[in-house]
Image: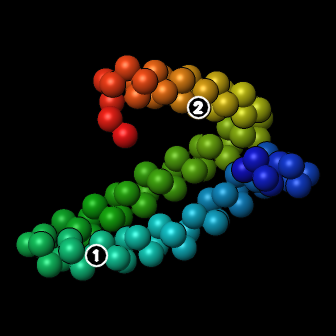
Amino acid sequence: MSTALLRDLDRVAATRLSFFLSIPALTGAGLYELKDAVGGGVSVLPLAVGTLVSFAVAYASIAWLLKYVAGHTFDAFVAYRVVVGVALFGLLATGALNA
């Protein structure tokens, strides 16, 4: 999203682009793991239901995010990332969390 914003795309277009770019990676990862899920004793019906529910929740989350980004800046997301990053560095530095 940062690169898209630096290339003068608006916030909504930058957000859409980032999600479009994630589709091949997420699809590939899902297909790669499918063989392990089906071969691991999971029946097809629960797998299909879980996939459909995951798709619906992801679609709703993305729709909400696009509406949010249309009227707000990325400031809340930036603050969240900075706080989480500082917390992780602190946990790593104190040895409470191992890399």
Q: Position of residue 43 (x, y in %)?
A: 13, 73
Is the C-beta separation of discs 2 and 1 under 8 Å?
A: no
Res. 29 image quadrant = bottom left
Point out which mark residue 34 bears.
Answer: 1
In the picture, measured across the screen, residue 61 lies left or right of residue 42, that is: right
Q: Which residue is mark 2?
A: 81
Is residue 70 shown left or right of residue 50?
right
Observer able to see residue 39: yes
The percent position of residue 64, horizontal first and vertical second, equals: 59, 43
The x, y position of residue 1, in whole percent, is 72, 50
**Residue plotted at (54% across, 23% down):** 86
Q: Is residue 71 above or below residue 62?
A: above
> Which residue is drawn at the image coordinates 54% and 73% (left, top)?
24
Placement of 5 over or under 26, stated as above or below: above
Which residue is located at x 47 percent, y 54 percent? 58
Would residue 76 be found to the left or right of residue 51 on screen?
A: right
Q: Amino acid at mark 2?
A: Arg
Toward the left, the furthest residue is 41
Amino acid carrying mark 1 in the image: Leu
* Residue at point 37%, 57% (across, down): 54
Q: Residues within 10 Å of mark 1 (few under 14, many from 20)?
A: few
Question: Based on the displayed image, in which of its 4 quarters is residue 17 positioned?
Answer: bottom right
Q: First in sequence: mark 2 or mark 1?
A: 1
Please say whether residue 12 is visible from this viewpoint: no
Q: CA distance from mark 2 to mark 1?
A: 31 Å
Q: Position of residue 50 (x, y in %)?
A: 28, 61
